[in-house]
Amino acid sequence: MNTENQQRNPVLLIHGLDDTEAVFHKMRVYLIQRGWSVYSLDLVPNNGDLGLDELAKQVADYITATFASEQRLDLVGFSMGGIISRYYVQRLGGINRVQRFITISSPHNGTVVAYGSWRPGCVQMRPGSIFLKDLNSDAVILGQLDFTSIWTPYDLMIVPGNSSQMSVGREVIIPVALHPWMLTDSRSLEVVTAALAKPIKLPFLNKASTQ
């Protein structure tokens, strides 16, 4: 492993609703082959029965148990996992540990699909929910780190698709046909890799779009 790889932060992958860490198999292999140390965990339960704030505490506990206190890390959250990760960053001190933060097809402004369930975690992901309003009230804090939101306008889980848009950080639009394909499409993998390899330079407020 060369010096450049040794200087890379470990990457923690956070899965979404009804998923496990296995959903990241292709991305994990892709990143490891390119020199990153990759970690992930199974959130329990994964079906929305527990609030996203409580699941974020599992992320915080995992990070405390796995990494030295001085270790900086990069965070990649898919779908619901991106919102859980935001809670960790914005409410549980993650802003002081995370350097690069990537969300993939995450309902930052809610998804109408969440109206199909009364489970606490799903209610929190409804458009205009108290939970999302609170997180979005100080989303500007994400400007303190290197934040990227990746999304597709054709998403049938995040409705409308532009719910993944944020007023801070970079935005990358990839026209992938299906929600889960955002983790396996070669364009997504390339964008994630580029974002993780980008030198830290703050503030980082540029916008970009890939069609």
Image (cartoon, rainbow, N blue to C red):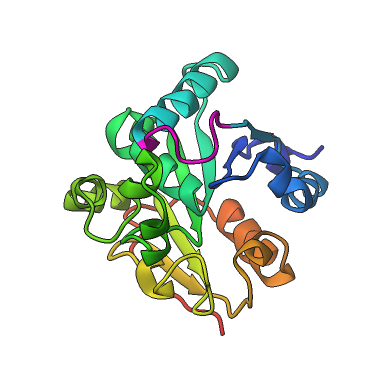
Can see residue 206?
no
Instruction: Please report the residue visible at 29 percent of the width from the left and 38 percent of the height from the top.
Output: 90
Instruction: Please report the residue visible at 66 percent of the width from the left and 33 percent of the height from the top.
Output: 39
Residue 48 among magenta residues: yes
Residue 160 among magenta residues: no
Main secondary structure along the magenta-highlighted residues: loop
Q: How many marks?
A: 0
Which quarter shows the C terminus? bottom right
Q: Quadrant of residue 198?
A: bottom right
Q: Which residues are magenta?
A: 43-52
Query: In front: 84, or 174?
Result: 84
> Residue 117 appears at what percent x and percent y?
41, 51
Which quarter shows the N terminus? top right
Instruction: Please report the residue visible at 37 percent of the width from the left and 35 percent of the height from the top.
Output: 51
Instruction: Please report the residue visible at 34 percent of the width from the left and 38 percent of the height from the top.
Output: 87
Query: In front: 72, or 116?
Result: 116
> Residue 33 appears at what percent x and percent y?
82, 48
Most distant residue in the bottom direction: 211
Can see residue 77?
yes
Instruction: Tell me: 46 left or right of 127.
Output: right
Q: Is residue 189 above or below residue 156?
A: above
Instruction: Tell me: 104 left or right of 137.
Output: right
Q: Is residue 175 above or below residue 102?
A: below
> Residue 59 appears at what percent x and percent y?
49, 28
Q: Is residue 113 above or below residue 207?
A: above
Instruction: Tell me: 107 left or right of 40.
Output: left
